[in-house]
């Protein structure tokens, strides 16, 4: 403090007290006060409930069980603690610099919710009808392959977790278990996601297997003319000493296999129509032009998706793409969306902008990796609870009541026609 009291110091600075070190008696009394503090006692109780928290802020605590998880972000932290580095990067990895993956999340922050008052919200209905089936919730499990790399139960655990909350699951072509094995434990409707193969007989085999398992909807992923530049996956793949990851839909077919066909074009839709009676949904549409072409070619539905930012590095979030896709379909077919959804408020915003339902990927994978089937169930329970809560605050008692009038942009414009083009 001698420097402050020098001739160049201001009068205000000169009046600052000189800090003196605590005496041993003062230190002892301070410690006694802290140990008797109710706040410290509360932190001790918190540490007992969440041992890994060690007195940290509750929202940053890492829960020891799925049921103690308060939100998706705690489950994410639990998954990061549980999984090895390669499995962790399998979930969180994005293409190139991850800008598209980040844009998926950031787009939700561009919208605010206009809540209403004095509305009877004692009963909230979250049911939605898609392709002749009534679903209890608009929250659907997006297709993700190789789930046994995250948990021994893999897709079987995810299917059980979804069935426990009566949610729809979309099964991946490259799942660890076959579509038949997954259907046997699902106990409810399943959709099948298809990666088209250049070997069309193998593609027909996949379609036939999905039909035999009872799937009524075929979700065709079309955003993969080539593989996205996921550098962390390439790094681990080059150094991995583990054996081949099982793929249940491949192991019972003896002919040429493989997935991916860079020659795919719109003629594919006619070929699929000849090959199946399932409804055809295109996953990966992000523009008005392709939405119009989807309707023109007789597609039954669309999922607005950029593969969770794992394919092209466009830098554009799916929520930003949603309004123009909706404009392109003009109400002719259902439109779903995935990418970046972490909260019930995110779901509300997507529905308010016009989506019929939403799909989640990383959240339920974090649940699976951290806690298995119970983690998947907990993720769905949390999101459903959060969706119901914001619907009550907004005064919307059903999904059909959630419209663009409940949104406003951060730039000050309300929802409605044209405003959604961020």
Image (cartoon, rainbow, N blue to C red):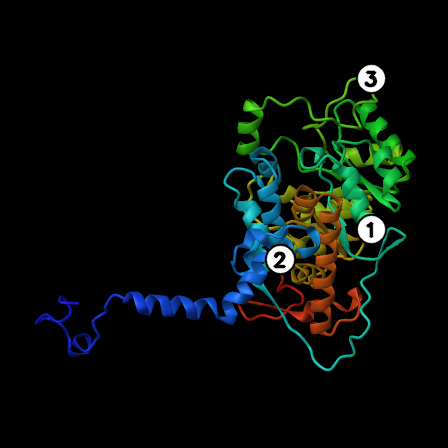
* Residue at x-position 75% and y-position 45%: 373
Residue shown at 87% from the left, 31% from the top: 209
Q: Measure the C-alpha gap from mark 3 to mark 1.
A: 35 Å
Q: For the residues carrying marks 2 and 1, which lies nearer the camera in this image?
A: 2
Q: Percent position (x, y) of residue 133?
A: 89, 52
Give the x, y percent position of residue 129: 85, 56
The first of marks 2 and 1 along the sequence is 2
In the rendered view, would you say 398 is above or below 269? below
Tell me residue 98's x, y (percent): 53, 43
Label 3, label 2: how many angstroms apart (C-alpha)? Answer: 52 Å
Q: What element carries label 3?
A: loop
At mark 2, the secondary structure is helix
The tag earlier along the polypeptide, 3 or 1, is: 1
Q: Residue 292 carries which label?
A: none
Disc nearer the start of the sequence (3/2): 2
- The residue at which mark 1 appears reads as 164
Pointer 1: residues within 10 angstroms few (<14), some, or many (20+)?
A: some
Corner quadrant of residue 194: top right
Looking at the rendered structure, the secondary structure element under dot 1 is helix
Q: Residue furthest top?
A: 255
Instruction: Name the residue tied to disc 2.
Output: 49
Choose mark 3 or mark 1, whichever is in front.
Answer: 1
Which residue lies at the image location 7% right of the left edge and 72% below the top edge?
7
Cα–Cα gap, marks 2 and 1: 26 Å
């Amino acid at each position: 403090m001698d420097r402050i009291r020098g001739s160049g110091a201001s009068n205000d600075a000169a009046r600052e007290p000189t800090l003196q070190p605590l005496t041993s008696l003062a230190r002892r009394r301070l410690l006694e006060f802290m140990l008797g503090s109710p706040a410290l006692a509360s932190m001790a109780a918190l540490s007992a409930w969440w041992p890994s928290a060690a007195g940290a802020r509750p929202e940053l605590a890492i829960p020891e069980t799925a049921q103690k998880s308060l939100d998706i972000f705690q489950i994410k932290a639990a998954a990061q603690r549980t999984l090895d580095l390669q499995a962790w990067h399998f979930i969180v990895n994005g293409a190139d610099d991850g800008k598209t993956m980040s844009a998926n999340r950031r787009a939700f922050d561009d919208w605010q919710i206009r809540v209403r008052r004095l509305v009877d919200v004692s009963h909230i209905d979250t049911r939605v009808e898609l392709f002749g089936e009534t679903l209890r919730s608009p929250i659907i499990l997006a297709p993700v392959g190789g789930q046994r790399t995250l948990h021994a139960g893999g897709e079987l655990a995810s299917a059980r977790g979804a069935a426990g909350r009566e949610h729809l699951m979309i099964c991946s072509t490259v799942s660890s278990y076959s579509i038949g094995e997954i259907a046997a434990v699902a106990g409810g409707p399943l959709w099948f996601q298809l990666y088209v193969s250049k070997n069309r007989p193998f593609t027909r085999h996949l379609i036939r297997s999905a039909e035999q398992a009872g799937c009524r909807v075929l979700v065709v992923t079309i955003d993969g003319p080539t593989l996205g530049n996921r550098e962390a996956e390439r790094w681990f793949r080059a150094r991995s000493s583990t054996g081949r990851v099982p793929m249940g839909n491949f192991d019972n077919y003896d002919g040429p296999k493989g997935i991916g066909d860079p020659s795919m074009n719109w003629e594919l839709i006619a070929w699929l129509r000849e090959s199946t009676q399932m409804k055809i949904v295109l996953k990966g549409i992000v523009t008005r032009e392709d939405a119009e072409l989807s309707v023109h070619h007789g597609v039954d539905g669309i999922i607005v998706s950029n593969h969770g930012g794992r394919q092209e590095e466009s830098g554009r979030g799916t929520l930003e793409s949603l309004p123009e896709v909706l404009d392109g379909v003009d109400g002719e077919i259902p439109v779903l969306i995935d990418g970046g959804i972490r909260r019930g408020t995110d779901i509300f915003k997507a529905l308010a902008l016009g989506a019929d339902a939403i799909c989640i990927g990383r959240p339920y994978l974090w649940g699976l990796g951290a806690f298995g089937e119970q983690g998947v169930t907990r993720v769905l329970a949390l999101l459903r609870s959060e969706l119901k809560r914001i619907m009550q605050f907004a005064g919307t008692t059903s999904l059909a009541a959630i419209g663009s009038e409940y949104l406003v942009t951060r730039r000050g414009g309300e929802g409605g026609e044209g405003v959604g083009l961020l």
